[in-house]
Image (spheres, rainbow, N blue to C red):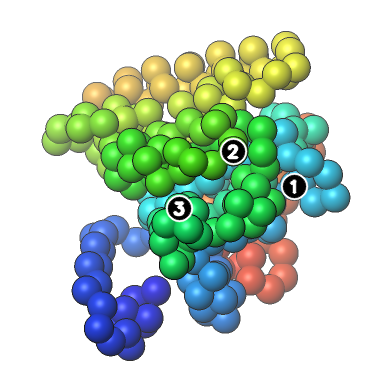
Amino acid sequence: MFDHCLRSRHYVNVVVAGKHPLPQWLTMDAAVVHCTEGIGIWQWASNDQGTEPDVVMACCGDTPTLEILAAVSILRQHLPDLKIRVINVVDLMKLQSASEHPHGLSEVDYDSLFTKDKHIVFGFHGYPWLVHRLTYRRTNRNLHVRGYKEEGTITTAFDIRVQNDLDRFHLVQDVVDRVPNLGSKGAYLKQQMQDKLIEHKHYIDKHGQDLPEIRNWKWMEPRSKKAGPKSFGKGSRKQRTNE
């Protein structure tokens, strides 16, 4: 995307860069394709291939993408039967109708990505109302956006996300609250997430930094809780690290 900004002409480009190292989710070739398209399903993080998803997990921005993927890894580990589609948005104007913006998706293409009726949990790097305004004409009204709520002070990076309900633990609870028929497994997972939020709070109060599992988190191919995590496979998935 930055390369595109440097090469563009007759555009006003605003680049907002973070100060901290972040994961490299895609290979360079895959990133060029994805940024050119502006939006797309990340198949390597999804498990709804061949069927309808139970929930759509969407993200736009660096830390929201990190937290959405961390939430997906928790959900796929503890609720392996839950079908999740992960969508990453690079060009926000893709969310608008094609009749409103030249970059916008047609109704058919939008519904193909986000479905017409499944719950969408959307992690966004700005104010949630912006995503709602961009999508207000779309068919699917089951959109739940987590973003900046003007909460936060001098604290840890992850705690700012917690204060804005944009962290992985709140996102998992959002899914449990909205997807029907999760039953006892969903209830126990929600309780675990509440426990983790309390553990997080106690840890940062004592140590002044985030939990090691937060600081050192890396995407790994999720497996069931009994099977445990699977190591990185070959190819582009090796690139998805925090290094």
Q: Nearer the viewer, mark 2 or mark 1?
A: 2
Judging by the rendered image, the residue that carries numbered circle 2 is 139
Q: CA distance from mark 2 to mark 3?
A: 12 Å
State whether residue 181 is above or below residue 55.
Answer: above
Q: Amino acid at mark 3?
A: Gln
Q: Quadrant of the N terminus?
A: bottom left
Q: Residues within 10 Å of mark 1 (few under 14, many from 20)?
A: many
Judging by the rendered image, the residue that carries numbered circle 3 is 96
State whether residue 134 is above or below residue 128.
Answer: below
User: At 56% from the left edge and 14% from the top edge, which residue is drawn?
Assistant: 191
Tell which circle, 2 or 1, labels the residue nearer the N-terminal end.
1
Q: Nearer the viewer, residue 93 or 32?
A: 93
| SS at mark 2 in the image | loop
| SS at mark 3 in the image | loop
| Residue lying farthest to the front in this orientation | 99
Q: Locate residue 128: give its quadrant.
A: top left
Q: CA distance from mark 1 to mark 3?
A: 26 Å
The disc placed on residue 47 is 1
Q: CA distance from mark 2 to mark 1?
A: 24 Å
Q: Quadrant of the C terminus?
A: bottom left
